[in-house]
Structure formats: C-alpha cells, structure tokens
C-alpha cells in the first residue's frame, strides 16, 4: 500500500512534466505566430543588415568597414576562415589593406576571419491584427522566385510598393502614381520621400573627417599619398592640420573677418576611396556592376565660437548631368539667424529663415534627398522645402533613365571666425532600375511600359544593396504564380500577401567574438545590437 507522500511525489513529477510540455507548446506557438528568429544569409540588404562577411579596420585611418563574402544563391559553405587573399581598400581613405599585418592579423587581407550573417527577430503575421505592412518596412516573406514549386525559402527585403499601386524606379528614387490617376501618364507620379527613421538608416558614408590617415602627405601604397579631400578652392581663410596653430587634422578653422573662402570636397582626391557614386566597400569582392553617380547628399558638422558680422554656409548642389548648372541649396548661419537659400539660373532666392542664437557650439546638417531639402540644428528640423518649391521633373526622369544626378558639396566662410569639427559627408541609398543588367520590371526606359502595377493583395520589394539584390526587379517572367489548388495567382516580380511572414525589427545577435577556448563565436557584439529601420 503506497504512502500519501509517494502519491504527492508522483503528482509533483507529473505536474513538472506537464509544465515543461506546456512551456514547449507555448514556445512553439510563439515562434510560429508571434516572433521568430532568422539569419541573414546574403548581402542584399547590406549594410543595413549583413550577410556572411568579413570585418576590417583600416591600419592607416582606423575606419571600420565590412566586406561581403561571396555566396551562391541564398546560401554559403565556408570554414571558420574566408579562404584566399583579397585586394581591398578602406571605404573612407582608400588605403590598400595589407595582405599581411602582423600587428593585427584579424584585419589583414589574407584569410580574414569570416563572420556569419546578422541574426534578427521578426514580428509575424501583423496583418492578421490589422497592422498592414508599410512602405519602407523591412519584411520577411516566402520567396516566389522559383520554378520548382518550392516556396520554402525566406527572403528579407525592404517593402517598396503596396497593394493597388503603380510604381517605378527612376534615377535612384521611387516613384508611385497618385491614387485614382492614370499610371500611363507621367504627371501621375510623385517621388516617395523616406521617413526620418528610415533615411537615417540608409545614409552611406562618403568621407568622415574624424578618420584621418597617419600617413598623410607620405607615399603609402600603389595609389600614392593620401590627400585631404576638403580643399580650399577660392578665397582665403581656411586652415587645417597646422601644428604651430594647434589645429588638428580633424578640424577645419575659418579665420577671415575681412574676406571669404570656399572649402570644396574633391571626390577625385583619393580614387580608391568612396566618391559621389554608389560604390560600397561591402561589394568589393566579385562586384561586376558599374557604379552610378550620387546626387542626394547630406553634409553635417559641429561649428563653435562663431564670431564676426558675416556668415558660414553649408552648400549642396545637384545637377541633372554635367551640362546642367543644377540647383544649389545653401544653409546659411550667422550669430543671430539661419536661412535656407536656393541658387538657380544665376539668381539667389530665400526659401525660409529662422531667428536663433547660434553662439556657442551647434550641430548643423543640410540634406538634399528625395527632392526635399532639410536643415537641422542640434538634431531639430528648422527649415525645409515644400513640394511646391522643389520637386522632380518626372518627364525628364522617365526619358533619361541612365542619367543619374550628380552631387557636390562645399563649405563657405564670409567675414567670420569659427572652428568645424566632426565633418561628415554622406550619400543616400541609390535604387537601380533600367541601368542594371537583367532587370525585368519597375523602371521607366523612356516610357512607362515597364512600371509595376500591383493587385489588391500584392507587394513589391527591393534590397537596400540595390546593385547586388535579386529582388522583384529581376525575378524571371516564368516565376509567375499560378496555384489553382491554393486559389492563388500573381504576376512575376510581386509578393502575394499570403507569402508575407512579418516585419523584421531587431538584430539580437550580430556577428560576435570568438573566445580562445571555443571553436565558435559565442560572445555577441552587444554594441551592434540594434532595431532595424
């Protein structure tokens, strides 16, 4: 006859087993219907999200950058090290990464350590709860790009087109027809401006003046000496890298209370570095796609102790092509106010102004992106253009699919004294269309025959790394969905709503560090954990 204590023991074990099973079931349900983890296999969303890659730190300027590891299809097969020796250049200063670097072997160009792709969390099936995917969301979906009927491969891209829309990619930007208009009429289309939280995620660095090579002025590689790309092109007063004046190579001082001077960015000063084009360090290995010009730019810096009766100007110019004088936008600051000016056809027009005390230290940023110019002071938007003041010539965009706009940047001082620090120049992400080999759709090649028109439950997606993303632009026509048993039909190049899995929202395990005692990278890089924008 069993004792009461024995029955309690059996009951306790049973309850424990049931609790574990319930926990497993709940975890399975949670994974299937709420949040699931995915691994990024390729670089189609780089550098927003990294696939298999190698990290480098330039031994000359100290800038850190990632280079994608070549993959086959949607997968890769690698050992712990990336076999081979690569010819790589620093994205910031153009330094040729040494083949061997005994002082830092993990960052030389011979068999650098390979890191796997970012591991991300995806919020699933939000549309079932009324939260429809929004333009610019990063989404995960079952890829319809197959002829075998196997739709089990997951892709991750940025959502560009929504149900019922007609759209095309033109000169790096996204154009969508206004609701209720004729998609064959060029005047129906409007450029799509990215929201601030997306735009901040897709800026690509051209030059960060905080990373100055130690070897400046000395021969260093096959490309000769490094040259400061910010160069005085007119007037006088700009000073940089002067020991006797205690001016750092990372500072730019303007000291001319009687005259003016212009500091212009020369993209040809270091040919191996990033210029005004969509060349990315991430794509250095195996890249065969020619780069195109960049027109949408951001110029930012801190200015301090502004004195004098004149002004300091941050200037961005955007040209249709080399023959076009372009549109020049100027953020002009004095000690008492800030103005946004437009120079065009030999005339200067004030767009807007704001009175503000600008003594002390302030951060200034001017952005010309998606046909909107914005000026920020200390992170706050203070001045901007309206669509009536600045908008694209859509007919020109359609008729010139290969003419990417050309940007330029300069900083001007006039009768003031000030010091600039943390000067950075960025370009916008450039979406590619008609100029890309193999593109099937979503572009205007002199007409509107190749626009994408989406059905009631269809989406269009593209990768941020546009020159190296196999997305809806390139899916072959024979991948058209025709599944009568599923009551599902869809044109090639689109993602049906039923294939959408969810929205990517967090990188929870970036490529980490490997401890000497372990064969895997078991320690995550906590500093790179981030929300996905």
Image (tube, rainbow, N blue to C red):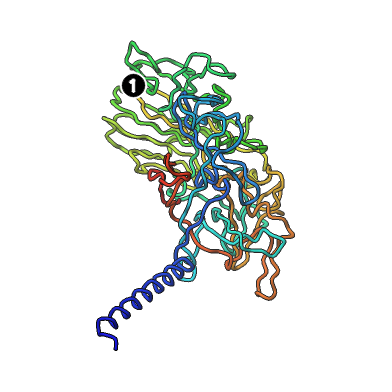
Q: Nearer the viewer, residue 16 or 201?
A: 16
Count of residue discs:
1
On screen, residue 88 versus residue 25, left or right, reads right
Q: Residue at x 42, y 15 (%)?
A: 236
Residue 355, image x, y percentages = 30, 37
Farthest residue, direction top: 244
- Residue 493 placement: quadrant: bottom right
> Within 10 Å of the Cα at label 1, are there few (<14), some (14-19), or many (20+) other Cα atoms?
many
Q: Residue lying at the far right in this picture: please name it.
A: 478
Secondary structure of residue under mark 1? strand
Q: In the image, is residue 36 above or below residue 469?
A: below
Q: In the rendering, at what x and y percent does residue 212 appear?
A: 43, 23
Can residue 202 be seen here?
Answer: yes
Q: Which residue is mark 1?
A: 416
Residue positioned 46% across, 49% down in the render: 198
The answer to which quarter of the image holds residue 360 is top left
Compare residues 18 and 103 and report the one nearer the observer.
18
Q: Is residue 441 above or below residue 272?
A: below
Q: Is residue 437 left or right of residue 518?
A: right
The answer to whether 218 is drawn above or below residue 385 in the figure is above
Query: Taking 311 as reference, is 158 left or right?
Result: right
Instruction: Tell me where residue 409 appears, x and y as whole percent.
Output: 49, 29
Looking at the rendering, which quadrant does residue 391 occupy? top right
């Amino acid at each position: 006859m069993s004792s009461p204590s024995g029955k309690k023991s059996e009951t306790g074990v049973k309850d424990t087993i049931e609790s574990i099973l319930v926990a497993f079931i709940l975890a399975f349900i949670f994974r299937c219907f709420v949040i699931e983890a995915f691994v990024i296999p390729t670089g189609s969303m780089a550098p927003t999200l990294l696939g298999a890659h190698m990290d480098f730190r330039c031994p000359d300027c100290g800038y850190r950058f990632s280079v994608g590891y070549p993959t086959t299809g949607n997968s890769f097969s690698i050992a712990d090290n990336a076999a081979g020796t690569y010819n790589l250049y620093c994205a910031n200063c153009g330094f040729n990464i040494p083949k061997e670097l005994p002082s830092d072997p993990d960052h030389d160009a011979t068999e650098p350590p390979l890191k796997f792709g970012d591991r991300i969390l995806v919020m699933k099936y939000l549309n079932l709860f009324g939260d429809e995917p929004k333009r610019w969301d990063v989404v995960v979906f079952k890829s319809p790009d197959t002829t075998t009927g196997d739709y089990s491969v997951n892709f991750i891209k940025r959502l560009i087109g929504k149900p019922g829309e007609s759209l095309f990619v033109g000169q790096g930007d996204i154009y969508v027809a206004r609701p209720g208009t004729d998609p064959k009429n060029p005047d129906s289309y409007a450029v799509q401006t990215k929201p601030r939280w997306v735009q901040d995620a897709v800026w690509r660095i051209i030059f960060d003046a905080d990373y100055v090579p130690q070897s400046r002025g000395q021969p260093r590689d096959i490309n000769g000496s490094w040259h400061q790309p910010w160069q005085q092109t007119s007037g006088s007063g700009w000073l940089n890298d002067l020991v006797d004046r205690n001016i750092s190579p990372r500072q730019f001082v303007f000291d001319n209370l009687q005259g003016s001077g212009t500091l212009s960015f020369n993209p040809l000063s270091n040919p191996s570095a990033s210029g005004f084009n969509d060349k990315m360090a991430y794509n250095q290995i195996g890249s065969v796609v020619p780069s195109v010009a960049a027109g949408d730019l951001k110029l930012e810096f801190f200015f301090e102790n502004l004195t004098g009766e004149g002004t300091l100007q941050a200037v961005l110019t955007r040209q249709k092509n080399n023959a076009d004088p372009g549109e020049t936008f100027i953020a002009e600051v004095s000690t008492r106010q800030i103005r946004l000016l437009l120079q065009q056809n030999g005339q200067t027009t004030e767009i807007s102004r704001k009175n503000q005390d600008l003594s002390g230290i302030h951060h200034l940023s001017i952005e010309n992106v998606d046909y909107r110019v914005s000026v920020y002071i200390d992170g706050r938007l203070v001045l901007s253009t309206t669509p009536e003041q600045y908008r694209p010539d859509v007919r020109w965009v359609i008729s010139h699919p290969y003419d990417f706009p050309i940007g330029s940047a300069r900083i001007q001082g006039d009768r003031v004294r000030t010091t600039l620090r943390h000067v950075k120049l960025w370009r916008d992400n450039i979406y590619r269309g008609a100029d890309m080999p193999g593109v099937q759709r979503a572009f205007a090649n002199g007409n509107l025959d190749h626009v994408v028109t989406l059905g009631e439950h269809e989406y269009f997606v593209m990768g941020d790394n546009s020159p190296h993303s196999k997305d809806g632009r390139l899916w072959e026509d024979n991948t058209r969905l025709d599944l009568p048993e599923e009551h599902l039909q869809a044109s090639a190049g689109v993602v049906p709503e039923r294939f959408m899995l969810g929205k990517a929202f967090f990188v929870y395990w970036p490529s980490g560090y490997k401890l000497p005692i372990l064969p895997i990278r078991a320690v995550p890089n906590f500093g790179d954990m981030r929300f996905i924008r």
